[in-house]
Amino acid sequence: MRNLYMCLLLAVLSACQKSTFIDPQPAQPFTPVKEVAQSPLVVILGSSTASGAGASDYKHAWAGLFSSYLNKGKIINLARGGYTTYHILPDGQEGLVAKRPSADTLRNITAALKLHPTLMIISMTTNDVANGYSVDEVMYNLQTIRRIALDNGVKRILITTSMPRKLNAQATARWLQQRDRTMRAYEQDAVNFFDPLADADNLFQANLTPDGIHPNDDGHRLLFKQLVSRLE
């Protein structure tokens, strides 16, 4: 299996070129208001926006808002700033691809599956492209992670698209491609995080971001609404 993964991933690259789980829940959690069918356990794999970056407090981040949305159940958030799809690949992928990060065995799909989630949310929005990785790599890694989750009994996996980010025109074109391919590949399990935040130039709307990279409280609220729309 490991050799097969290497062969397939190298083909993509050549074509386009004990365990402590972090749960950044607020100290005073919201009063639960709603239960979804995917309760009782949700695990989030993601990067900085999923971990709450840009929000004034975690409770105002999309993940914090989703915590308050659940009536029964729990969210365990394994997201970490700066992470890419390579960081959340399964155990055994460490260092297999040159010039790509190793999997984080405390925050990857293997760690998530040990928690036996019912619903998994994968939100790797902009870091792969920002680091120069191709959209083919992003999509291949997401497909690998999703397949492993489904094979191990996760009932549903939601995958968010890219988001706007100010870097350069080539990167913006790739984030648009990542958005479109994610929406096509995962349909009702894809969550559009790009369009609600984007301006006419496909960059962050100035009123929705503190830094051009992460959403502010209002931006996080829009992302939360996008997520919930896939569950109702």
Image (cartoon, grey):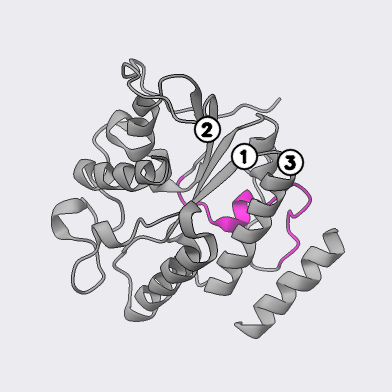
**Residue visible at 46% across and 60% down in the picture:** 127
Rounded to the nearest angstrom, the CA distance separating label 1 from label 2 is: 8 Å
Where's residue 2, x and y in %? 84, 59
Magenta-highlighted residues: 81-97
What residue is shown with label 2?
Answer: 38
Q: Does the CB distance between marks 1 and 2 fall below 8 Å?
A: yes
Residue at x-position 69% and y-position 53%? 147
Q: CA distance from mark 2 to mark 3?
A: 16 Å
Say what amino acid the circle numbered 2 marks: Gln
* Apparent side of residue 118 relative to residue 37 in the rendered image (left or right): right
| Secondary structure category for the residue under label 1 | loop
Q: Are marks 1 and 3 in contact (CB under 8 Å)?
A: no
Foreground pick, 85 / 63: 63
Q: Please say if 36 is above or below 217.
A: above
Q: Is residue 88 covered in magenta?
A: yes
Callout 3: SS: loop
- 115 left or right of 159 in image: right
Q: Please name the residue that numbered disc 1 is placed on.
A: 155
Residue 90 position, x and y percent, is 71, 49
Q: Residue tagged by mark 3?
A: 152
**Lower sequence index among marks 1 and 2:** 2
